[in-house]
Image (cartoon, grey):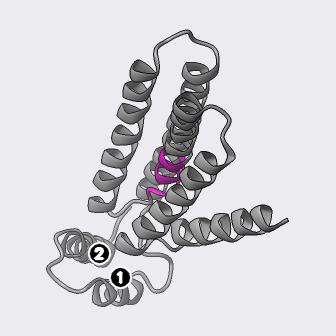
Amino acid sequence: MKTVKDSRKELIVNEIQLWKQANMLPEHYCDYLLALYTEGDGMEHSDQKNAQKKIMLKDFFLSICAILISLFVIYFTELSIVLQTTILASFVGLLVAIGIYYIKKQLSPLLLYMAAACILLLSSIEITEELFGRSSFGMYITLFLNCFLWIGAGLKWKLGYLSLSGMAGGVLLIIFILL
């Protein structure tokens, strides 16, 4: 049975979470107040933690399905390059749009963005092979453009893992070319 003190505390915690979601106070203020009122037990209720776990699981399956369908479209269908590109571009656009929605809801879009980057890489390689054959120069240019795109997107959206992936890819590509 809840006491009056517990119900007041729960009311205050819920109100602070609403302030945080509505950006009525800076996030670090809300975090401090939540830690203060929950006595360090955590800033989120178990229902919210479970909901975030379910969302992350859905993200994982959505990302894996998008990548697998993309691989199927590229390697196991006889679709024209224009149709393949349209399908893959729609996957990338969908994953990025869902990722932007997640950022607005203060959820992590990590898996979605990484899946979109992988699909974009696969589709650009397929387009390059279709247009230039197995030309190494065309492939190097395509891979460098992908790396620069990852770095730029990482810097714009402040996603360190994306910038780091682009830099690592660029360095590995330079090493491969020089060797």
Furthest-right residue in view?
Answer: 179
Q: Residues within 10 Å of mark 1 (few under 14, many from 20)?
A: many
**Residue 17 place in picture, x, y as percent:** 27, 71
Region in magenta: 109-117
Quadrant in which the N terminus appears: bottom left
Quadrant position of residue 16:
bottom left
Q: Residue 34 carries which label?
A: 1
Would you say the residues marked 2 and 1 are in contact, meaning their CB atoms lie under 8 Å apart?
yes
The secondary element bearing badge 2 is classed as helix
**Residue 129 place in picture, x, y as percent:** 60, 33
Q: Does the image show residue 61?
A: no
Q: Is residue 75 above or below residue 91?
A: above
The secondary element bearing badge 1 is classed as helix
- Residue 132 within the magenta-colored segment of the rendering: no
What residue do we see at 49% from left, 65% from top?
Answer: 148
Q: Which sits earlier in the primary sequence, circle 2 or circle 1? A: 2
| Left or right, 106 with reference to 141 | left
What residue do we see at 55% from left, 62% from top?
Answer: 147
What residue do we see at 57% from left, 66% from top?
Answer: 166
Q: Is residue 74 above or below residue 139?
A: above
- Residue 116 within the magenta-colored segment of the rendering: yes
Q: Does the image show residue 27?
A: yes
Quadrant position of residue 36:
bottom left
Q: Which amino acid does label 1 sit on?
A: Leu
**Residue 157 place in picture, x, y as percent:** 36, 69
Q: In this view, does 118 lie above or below 15?
A: above
Give the residue pinned by disc 2.
13
Q: What residue type is labelled 2?
A: Val
Quadrant in which the C terminus appears: bottom right
